[in-house]
Amino acid sequence: MLRVATACLSLLIAGSAFAADPVFPPGSRIGLVPPDTMQLTRGISGFFDPKTGAAIVLMEMPAEAYPAMAAGFTEESLKSQGFSLKTRDTVKVAGTDAILIQGDQKDGERSIPKTVLLAPEQGLTALVIAQLPQGSPDSEIARIRTALQTVSIRPPLTMEQQVASLPFRIADTAGFRPLRVMAGNSILFTDGPAEVVKGADQPIMIVAQSYAPAPPPDARESFARQALGTNMLLKDTIYERSQSFRQGGADWHEIVAKAKDGPTEQPVVILQTIRFGPDGYLRMVGIVREDQRDAVMPRFRKMVDSVGAR
């Protein structure tokens, strides 16, 4: 009787280890059962180990991206990207066949163990990338491999659910509608019927939280200008105003500029506002056609002033 009870208890314990529920990062349709040393990370959709720096990143790609991405998971193609392939398997994940590769990624003089899962499911392509410190033992690589095979994909989230998962809140959207939530930390707004905004056809506002260290006060002017300059779709930028100020107990920097939409040559006006905090910064960028400036810029201002921390 004691042996039977012990055997049953062992089965229950073993079963519970495999019955752990997947953890979904905020706003993500992709989740998994992470290793017990990992926790959710901020700023990206994924998990990390604060002691070793090991990380798992979950990326949602369009469903139509799968064939081309799968074709690139060959030894020759991966080698051209500095990835030395060790194993390539087909595994069952979330009810579908997925590709699971493991190898070493060349990073300068270092060789980083990396495991990647690619799976098509329910209208998206799931790309999961796990990276371990150089020299990690085979047991850790096997543990990561096991974690990636627990990938689960939940049904599409409503826009309300996605907005609620963001690390900030917007009290007044000023009549703009949310169009897309990206990476769990940013959101795109527009005003108009189009679901895909081309050029400057409709005004857009992007609000994004970054957990990268904020620059010191004397570097914020150049930081803000450099951030605006990274937008490759704008050209011939002329600054009208660039200033720092204090509001609501926080330091801010704001730029108002004129530019041209690169593909269409349409004159536009840009409002970029950055609010700096102790653990990162919040960047807001609004772009509108110049002929709509008077009607839309006050609405950008209204939305920006209503953004706050959760």
Image (cartoon, helix red, strand yellow):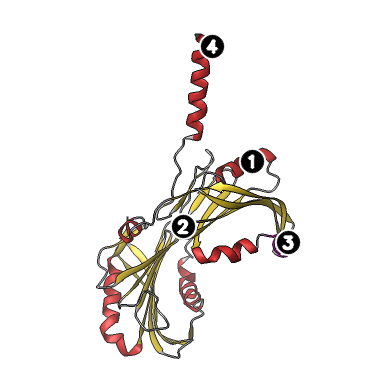
User: Tag on residue 45?
Assistant: none
Labels 4 and 3: the sequence-earlier one: 4
Q: What residue is pinned by disc 1?
A: 142
Q: Earlier in the sequence, mark 2 or mark 4?
A: 4
Q: Which mark sits nearer the N-terminus, 2 or 3?
A: 2
Q: Which residue is mark 4?
A: 3
Circle nearer the N terminus (1, 4): 4
Image: 58 above or below 15: below
- Secondary structure of the magenta portion, mostly? helix
Q: Which picture quadrant has residue 162?
A: bottom left
Provide the residue span drawn in magenta. 74-80
Image coordinates of residue 136 in percent, x first then y, are 68, 43
Amino acid at circle 1: Ala
Q: How many C-alpha atoms fall within 10 Å of the one at disc 2: few (<14), some, or many (≥20)?
A: some
Alpha carbon distance from label 2 to label 3: 30 Å
Taking depth in this image into account, of 135 and 212 the one nearest to the observer is 135
Mark 3 = which residue? 79
